[in-house]
């Protein structure tokens, strides 16, 4: 007898970057991980917390929220914690969507927006990019109608690495209807050096319909612990809390995040090293004749007609990258990893 379940065939499977476990002489540049790892203070905090792993974590994450409050200058009630920003991405359509309701997102952006929307029973309305792979915010506004319940904006955008500048973002937020929740995913904000950029946190006090998502997975090097957070007005946070699972962030993750926030000098060194390598890798690939987008993140996007074949070719050379629709995404690694990548790219030019 066949088992019975809901038909979920319309929901795409999330394709994670390939692991390197069991492989020899392979480097992974597929998942935008921080190759330098977290601050040594994080390791100390995890070791100190190991003796209490038999206890449930603080379900409210009060200590971490207080630390975030002191860092950002918003009261603790402006924060919500998630098992990575991914969990918050999945919680938001549960709050805002349902049968017939739609979420607006860019055609080329983080795939979890689509998956989360469909799992919540919503519909996806995609908006085309500009010819230069920029987000078309005017088109996002045009797409809004009576069935729109949510809008996702990644800034910087994943996988293109491009940003929406301060003036364009503020103009956009002013034109969004007051009752439409806008999700500003800033997972890669720490890597931005373009002075035209401004975090949406700058505008948060004036927009109760805005929630900004951040993560400890990238610049802070805690991808394996799954810890992220959202920042919004308390009314929205309180409503979103109703969709959160109890004890969704672990004791170790909370303590690690507190320690990571407390060592900004280390984070600054990691970011600078990444930015330096990003510039070097970008310039070298361009000089080799490849089409590559300028990036404000810890990865580069190479538009390509056959990204899977190109990814397979690099994999044969011991380099795992991420093929996506329309191009290849390559994480910025350590100088040694990047040297190997550039050597491989030079043989393909």
Image (cartoon, grey):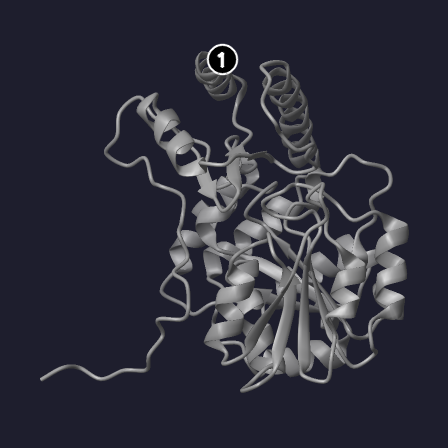
Q: Position of residue 20 (x, y in %)?
A: 32, 35
Q: Nearer the viewer, residue 17 or 203?
A: 17
Q: Nearer the viewer, residue 129 or 19?
A: 129
60 to the left or right of 55: right
Picture residue at 76% right of the left edge, 62% below the top: 139
The residue wearing badge 1 is 346
Q: Residue at x 39, y 52 (%)?
A: 15
Identify the residue at horizontal 44%, vertical 36% (top origin). Answer: 306
Other-residue count near label 1 (Cα within 10 Å), few / some / many at <14 / 14–19 / ≥20 = some
Secondary element at image label 1: helix
Residue 228: % across, % down: 58, 58
Quadrant in the rendering for residue 177: bottom right
Q: Is residue 203 visible?
A: no
Q: Which of the 4 image quarters holds residue 104?
A: bottom right
Can you say which quadrant of the picture contains the N terminus? Answer: bottom left
- Residue 48's place in the image compared with 308, above or below, is below
> Residue 258: where, in percent of width, then height?
61, 52
Left or right relative to 31: residue 69? right
On screen, residue 45 above or below 145:
above
- Residue 176 in sight in this render: yes
Relative image position of residue 263 (x, y in whole percent): 66, 39
As rendered, which of 172 and 291 lies closer to the eye? 291
Which residue corresponds to the image point at 81% horizontal and 61% vertical from the top-left?
A: 138
The total number of labels drawn is 1
């Amino acid at each position: 007898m066949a088992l019975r379940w809901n038909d979920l065939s319309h929901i795409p499977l999330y394709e994670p970057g390939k692991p390197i476990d069991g492989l020899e002489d392979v480097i992974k540049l597929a998942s935008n991980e921080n190759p330098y790892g977290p601050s040594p203070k994080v390791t100390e905090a995890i070791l100190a917390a190991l003796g209490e792993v038999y206890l449930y974590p603080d379900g409210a994450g009060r200590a971490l929220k207080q630390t975030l409050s002191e860092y950002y200058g918003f009261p603790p009630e402006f924060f919500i914690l998630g098992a990575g920003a991914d969990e918050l991405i999945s919680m938001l359509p549960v709050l805002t969507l349902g049968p017939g309701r739609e979420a607006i997102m860019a055609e080329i952006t983080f795939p979890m927006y689509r998956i989360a929307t469909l799992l919540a029973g919503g519909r996806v309305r995609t908006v085309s990019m500009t010819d230069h792979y920029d987000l078309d915010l005017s088109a996002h506004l045009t797409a809004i109608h009576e069935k729109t319940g949510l809008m996702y904006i990644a800034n910087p955008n994943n996988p293109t690495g491009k940003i929406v500048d301060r003036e364009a973002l503020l103009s956009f937020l002013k034109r969004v209807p007051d009752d439409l929740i806008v999700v500003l995913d800033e997972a890669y904000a720490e890597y931005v050096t373009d002075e035209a950029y401004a975090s949406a946190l700058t505008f948060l006090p004036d927009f109760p319909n805005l929630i900004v998502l951040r993560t400890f997975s990238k610049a802070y090097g805690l991808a394996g612990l799954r810890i992220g957070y959202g920042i919004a007005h308390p009314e929205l946070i309180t409503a979103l809390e109703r969709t959160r699972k109890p004890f969704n962030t672990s004791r170790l993750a909370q303590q690690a995040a507190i320690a990571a926030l407390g060592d900004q000098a280390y984070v600054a060194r990691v970011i600078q090293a990444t930015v330096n390598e990003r510039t070097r890798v970008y310039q070298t690939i361009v000089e080799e004749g490849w089409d590559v987008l300028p990036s404000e993140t810890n990865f580069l996007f190479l538009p390509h007609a056959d990204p899977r074949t190109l990814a397979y070719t690099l994999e044969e050379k011991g380099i795992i990258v991420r093929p996506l629709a329309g191009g290849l995404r390559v994480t910025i690694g350590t100088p040694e990893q990047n040297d190997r990548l550039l050597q491989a790219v030079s043989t393909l030019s």
